[in-house]
Image (spheres, rainbow, N blue to C red):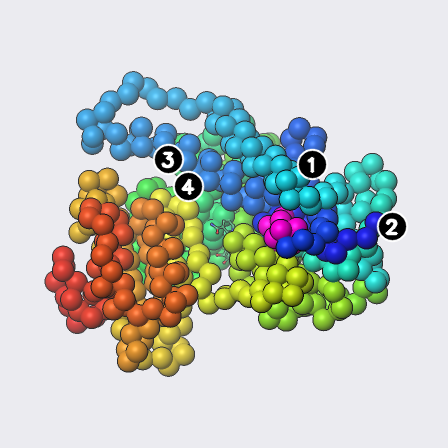
């Protein structure tokens, strides 16, 4: 049985990044993954690269180009005759991007001497890992350390089972052959909003049914409110407090019944995307006698250092507590590799940025105003609209704002929340400031290039102290 210093089970952003870091640190490293790409070969990268972050961003970009051509270019004096969309070509471009990145990981593994195994990994007793290939062939390897990085799966609703044709998960909604005339979405979360936006921009009538009465409950309320207004302006039909009870496929259409404050209604769609959250993909990945424990949500139980409590067994990414975000998983993978190598690996969960890649984008780091208030922390807020930023106006991207929350006495930044163009990039400055325990005054005193969108961050920092330069400074 081949022996490794570290065996990662799962090659998503948590597992493959951790494996590269472990190999960099001189550890003999293996990484196991069962995913097979469209070409029938192993495709490393997990959900993020194959059916998540990267392909969705490719389609978001394609659909934005189409939308701008049909809706925004005229303002610039640019006219095009009858633009068309070739969905097959758009999906082909997306697949090419995915292939580029999954092959890139294969190259990175070779360059770093990480041994990749293609098959389903299962942790047994004493850190033996059994790998079952697609043809059923079994191999066993052993790790001095084993890191479970088995990711997550879409949650299925009992009355709306995924069939890959009419009722789709995120992967299905990334591979449609044509633009559906009517697209239903259950869940106004990250996936529902991103993929709902893609098909809306390409011409679908999109209805999003959300069970909660609050829109984007995890985001700051001011940001969620501004975003909802923009999405509705774009024609996304978002219905809140909608409890779906039935989804039936009849004659090639999906009939969805839901009830909200107005009563019960049945809508008919060509396709239905179910995006009601994800759950840890832990089943069958660990033998009961491996000693690894699962919590009530099927996640591996770990401590603050991602250790499972079993000697040499760790777990990282979507399959453990914390945010289900690729970059959170990668940070944990690196931290565990460093801990195994005797270094001081660490993840600061308080400064993990969130981004939703809609148009406008939504991004935040730290606490929302409601969380700060509930914790009884004295605070001040400062906000600034993109409509007053020269660069934003020149770009025709005036929607949204930046809102900063700082401690009322120490001025330490507690959270920054944004909705607007390119805020996925702007948030990085605030993550750095928070990681260095920065104050709003620190950002207020830093020179920001003019004209840039980053001036909205600068002005929001100034607004905390009621001294924004390009807006009237009100009391709150
Ligand atoms: P989510 O948790 O973001 O949103 C699910 C939504 O569905 C919630 O608003 C919830 O209230 C609603 N819901 C649940 N049950 C429902 C029901 N029966 N009827 C109607 N609404 C219902 O989950 P998601 O959008 O499926 O995404 C899954 C995970 O993937 C998330 O943890 C997310 O963070 C991650 N992800 C992140 C990104 C990103 O960072 N940009 C992109 C995609 C996915």
Image quadrant assignment for residue 177: top right
Quarter occupied by residue 406: bottom left
The answer to whether residue 139 is above or below residue 439 is above
- Which residue does the image show at 30% across and 78% down from the upper left? 410
Q: Residue 94: where, in percent of width, then height?
A: 51, 32
Q: Residues within 10 Å of mark 4 (few under 14, many from 20)?
A: many
User: Label 1, on which residue?
Assistant: 42
Q: Which stretch did the figure color magenta?
A: 16-24
354 vs 128, left or right, is left
Which residue is drawn at the image coordinates 31% and 28% (left, top)? 69
Mark number displayed over residue 1? 2
Please name the residue that numbered disc 3 is placed on. Answer: 64
Choose the circle earlier in sequence order: 1 or 2: 2
User: From the image, which quarter does the C terminus lie in?
Assistant: bottom left
Residue to which mark 4 is pinned: 197
Please indicate, yes or no, whether residue 237 appears anywhere in the rendered image. no
Say what secondary structure mark 4 lies in: helix
Could you say which quadrant of the image residue 253 lies in? top right
Mark closest to the chain's N terminus, 3 or 1: 1
Do the CB atoms of the residues marked 2 and 4 lie less than 8 Å apart? no
| Element type where label 2 sits in the image | loop
Q: Is residue 29 magenta?
A: no
């Amino acid at each position: 049985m081949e022996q490794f210093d570290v065996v990662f089970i799962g090659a998503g952003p948590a597992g493959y990044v951790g494996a590269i870091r472990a190999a960099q640190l001189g550890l003999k490293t293996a990484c196991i993954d069962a995913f097979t790409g469209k070409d029938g070969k192993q495709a490393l990268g997990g959900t993020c690269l194959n059916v998540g972050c990267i392909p969705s961003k490719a389609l978001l970009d394609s659909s934005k180009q189409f939308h701008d051509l049909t809706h925004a270019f005229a303002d610039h004096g640019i006219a095009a005759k009858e633009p068309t969309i070739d969905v097959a070509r758009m999906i082909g471009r997306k697949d090419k991007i995915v292939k580029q990145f999954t092959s890139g990981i294969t190259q990175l593994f070779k360059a770093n001497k990480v041994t990749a195994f293609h098959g389903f990994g299962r942790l047994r007793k004493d850190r033996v890992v059994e790998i079952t290939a697609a043809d059923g062939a079994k191999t066993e390897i052993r790790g001095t350390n084993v890191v479970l990085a088995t990711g997550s799966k879409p949650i299925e609703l009992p009355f709306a089972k995924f069939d890959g044709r009419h009722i789709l998960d995120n992967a299905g909604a990334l591979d449609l052959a044509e633009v559906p005339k009517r697209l239903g979405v259950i869940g106004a979360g990250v996936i529902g909003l991103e993929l709902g936006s893609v098909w809306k921009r390409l011409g679908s009538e999109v209805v999003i049914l959300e069970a909660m009465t609050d829109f984007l409950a995890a985001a700051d309320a001011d940001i969620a409110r501004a975003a909802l207004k923009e999405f509705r302006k774009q024609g996304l039909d978002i219905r809140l407090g909608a409890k779906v009870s039935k989804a039936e496929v009849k004659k090639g259409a999906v009939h969805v019944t839901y009830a909200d404050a107005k009563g019960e209604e049945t809508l008919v769609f060509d396709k239905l995307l179910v995006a009601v959250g994800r759950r840890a993909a832990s089943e069958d990945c660990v033998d009961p006698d491996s000693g690894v424990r699962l919590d009530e949500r099927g996640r591996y139980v770990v401590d603050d250092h991602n250790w499972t409590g079993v000697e040499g067994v760790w777990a990282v990414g979507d399959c453990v507590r914390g945010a289900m975000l690729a970059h959170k998983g990668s940070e944990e993978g690196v931290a565990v590799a460093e801990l195994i190598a005797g270094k001081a690996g660490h993840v600061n969960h308080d400064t993990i940025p969130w981004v939703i890649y809609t148009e406008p984008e939504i991004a935040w780091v730290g606490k929302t105003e409601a969380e700060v208030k509930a914790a009884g922390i004295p605070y001040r807020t400062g906000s600034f609209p993109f409509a007053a930023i020269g660069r934003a106006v020149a770009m025709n991207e005036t929607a949204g704002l930046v809102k900063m929350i700082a401690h009322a006495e120490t001025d330490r930044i507690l959270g920054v929340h944004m909705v607007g163009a390119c805020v996925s990039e702007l948030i990085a400055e605030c993550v750095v400031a928070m990681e260095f325990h920065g104050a709003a005054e620190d950002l207020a005193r830093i020179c920001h290039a003019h004209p840039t969108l980053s001036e909205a961050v600068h002005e929001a920092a100034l607004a905390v102290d009621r001294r924004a330069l390009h807006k009237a400074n009100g009391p709150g």
